[in-house]
Structures are given as structure tokens and as C-alpha cells.
Image: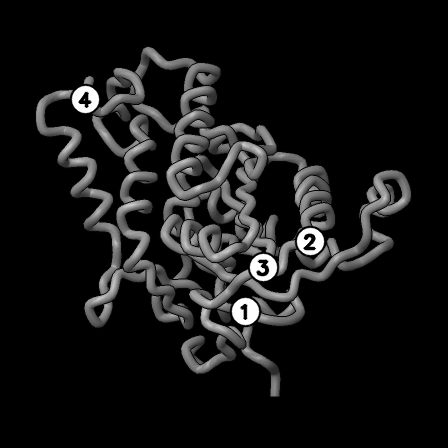
């Protein structure tokens, strides 16, 4: 059965208000796939948090940059992007794992950290990489790991005898996430389209903050100001970001797979 035939949100995402939203990502810039939706949710009175698992400290072709340098650059880029869509540093969490090595991190430790923030923030909606619908989605290693780590954490968070130290010592409570928006999966599995027409410019401006990744700064980093790069580069970066936005029936949109209910069923259709 196509995901398009499955349950939709009771209210369109554009009508959500008063919710707590948690986006879990692997890298600084993964949230860019949802910048329009996040900007809209923030403007509509929802509280939005972004949790990034790695520091992004490996993804460059510039031999002059060290891991430490790159981690600092990527952190500031993400904070600058968040500022464009109305989010402050207080709504940013980074677990500090090395870029490209997430699948080799201690799985129990990572899941425990994710469970902690799920229980602490109690999100009404969790955004994460799509682990796959009816079959595993192949994604590059950190994205693949992030998809399954987030799914496992959601399932663990609702059981009070898992990571019980958080409940006994930190005074947290077991918590079941009720709704999900998955990004980055198969196009055919998308069942929810969010109209971001009024937030296109915010999405574009936020995207331009990732200079070390989406410009020639990938090869030769010259700082955060696009004007410091070769002539015409700033225009090319803006054009690249605009071209990534999908337009359907004349509306600029972001697409997700929506799921409601137990995390055990997030990856397959209901059984007969």
C-alpha cells in the first residue's frame, strides 16, 4: 500500500500551533530540508528544537582546515541558519559525535542521550530521517545511523524500565512521542505536503549560511561571508538553494512521510 493512502495529520501541518517540535539530525545542515516548515511552525506559535548528533567536523575538501576548526565553523553556520528561521541557540542541542563515525559510536550511549532529550522535551512531533517504509532506505552512513538511532530512542523512551536512571535520578518520565514527520526517504512514501510559499525567502537565507558546504568553501574556505568568494559565487549559491525547493501546483512545498501511533509500526503497513 502506498504511504499516500495512509493517515494524514488531524490538522494540516500549516495549522499546527502550541506544539513542541523536535528535529533529530546527523549533521549541521540536515535541518535545511525542513527549514521552510520549521520557520512556519515557529511563526505559528510552536516551540522548535534542533538536535544534531555530530559536529560535522570531517566534511570538507579544504586541506587547511582541522577537525577542530571545522567543528567550530559548522556549529556557527547552523546557529546562523537557525537564527534566520527564528530559532535561538537555547533551542539547539549537539551531541558532539564525530562526523562520518556515527554508526561506530556506542549505540547504547547514543540512544540513551536521545531518550534523555525526548523525555525532557516531550515533543508532540518528532522529525527525523526516514528509516524506510516496508523496506530499509539506503542512505549515507551517518544519515542511515541517525534514522535508526532516532527510531530506537523513540521506542525506548516510552518504557520506564529502560534508562531508568533518568527517571530515578533526573526526575524525568517515560514518554511516548505521538506524531512523526520523516524526511529524506523515498519520494513515493511521502504522504504529507507542507506549503512553505510564505517562507521560501527564510529557507533560502538560512541555506546560504552553510558556506563551508554549499559553496567553493568546500574546497577553499575563505570565511562565512559569501562576498569574500570569487565573483558570481554568491548568486550561484542562492540559485542552488532556490532550485532545491520543490514546486507543486504553483506552491513551494516540503514533503514528508507522516506517521501517528506506536513507533513499532513506523516502518511498515498495518498487518492484516
Mark closer to the observer (1, 2)? 2
167 with respect to 234 (left or right): right
On residue 259, which mark appears? 1
Q: Compare residues 205 and 119 and report the one nearer the observer.
A: 205
Callout 2 touching callout 3 (CB < 8 Å): no
- How crowded is the residue under tag 1: few (<14 C-alpha within 10 Å), some, or many (20+)? many
Q: Quick one: SS at disc 2?
A: loop
Callout 3 touching callout 1 (CB < 8 Å): no
Q: Is residue 205 above or below residue 46?
A: above
Q: Quick one: SS at disc 1?
A: strand
Image quarter of the C terminus: bottom right
Point 86% across, 47% down: residue: 167
What residue would you read off at disc 4?
A: 227
N-term mark: 3 or 1: 3
Cα distance in 3D space between marks 4 and 2: 41 Å
Q: Is residue 187 above or below residue 113?
A: below
Cα distance in 3D space between marks 1 and 2: 17 Å
| Residue 229: % across, % down | 18, 20
N-term mark: 4 or 1: 4
What residue would you read off at disc 3?
A: 18
Q: Please tell me in which quadrant of the rendered image residue 78 appears.
A: top left
Mark closer to the observer (3, 1)? 3
N-term mark: 4 or 2: 2
| Residue 168: % across, % down | 90, 44
Cα distance in 3D space between marks 3 and 1: 19 Å
What residue would you read off at disc 2?
A: 122
Cα distance in 3D space between marks 3 and 4: 39 Å
| Residue 150: % across, % down | 60, 51
Q: Farthest left residue?
A: 231
Point 66% across, 44% down: residue: 114
88 with respect to 173 (left or right): left
Amino acid at each position: 500500500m502506498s504511504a499516500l493512502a495512509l493517515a494524514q495529520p488531524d490538522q494540516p501541518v500549516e495549522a499546527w500551533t502550541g506544539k513542541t517540535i523536535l528535529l533529530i539530525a546527523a549533521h549541521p545542515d540536515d535541518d535545511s530540508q525542513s527549514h521552510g516548515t520549521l520557520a512556519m511552525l515557529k511563526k505559528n506559535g510552536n516551540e522548535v528544537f534542533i538536535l544534531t548528533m555530530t559536529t560535522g567536523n570531517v566534511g570538507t575538501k579544504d586541506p587547511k582546515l582541522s577537525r577542530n576548526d571545522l567543528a567550530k565553523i559548522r556549529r556557527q553556520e547552523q546557529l546562523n541558519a537557525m537564527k534566520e528561521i527564528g530559532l535561538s541557540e537555547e533551542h539547539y542541542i549537539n551531541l558532539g559525535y564525530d562526523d562520518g563515525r556515527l554508526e561506530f559510536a556506542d549505540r547504547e550511549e547514543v540512544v540513551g542521550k536521545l531518550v534523555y532529550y525526548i523525555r525532557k522535551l516531550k515533543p508532540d512531533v518528532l522529525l527525523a530521517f526516514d528509516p524506510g517504509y516496508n523496506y530499509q532506505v539506503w542512505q549515507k552512513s551517518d544519515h542511515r545511523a541517525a534514522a535508526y538511532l532516532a527510531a530506537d530512542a523513540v521506542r525506548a523512551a516510552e518504557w520506564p524500565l529502560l534508562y531508568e536512571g533518568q527517571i530515578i535520578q533526573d526526575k524525568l518520565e517515560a514518554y511516548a512521542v505521538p506524531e512523526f514527520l520523516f524526511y529524506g526517504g523515498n519520494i513515493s512514501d511521502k504522504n504529507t505536503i507542507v506549503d512553505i510559499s510564505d517562507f521560501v525567502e527564510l529557507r533560502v537565507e538560512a541555506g546560504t549560511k552553510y558556506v563551508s558546504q554549499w559553496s567553493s568553501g568546500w574546497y577553499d574556505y575563505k570565511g562565512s561571508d559569501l562576498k569574500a568568494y570569487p565573483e558570481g559565487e554568491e548568486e550561484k549559491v542562492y540559485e542552488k538553494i532556490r532550485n532545491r525547493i520543490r514546486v507543486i501546483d504553483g506552491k513551494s512545498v516540503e514533503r514528508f512521510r507522516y506517521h501517528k501511533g506506536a513507533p513499532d509500526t513506523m516502518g511498515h503497513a498495518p498487518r492484516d
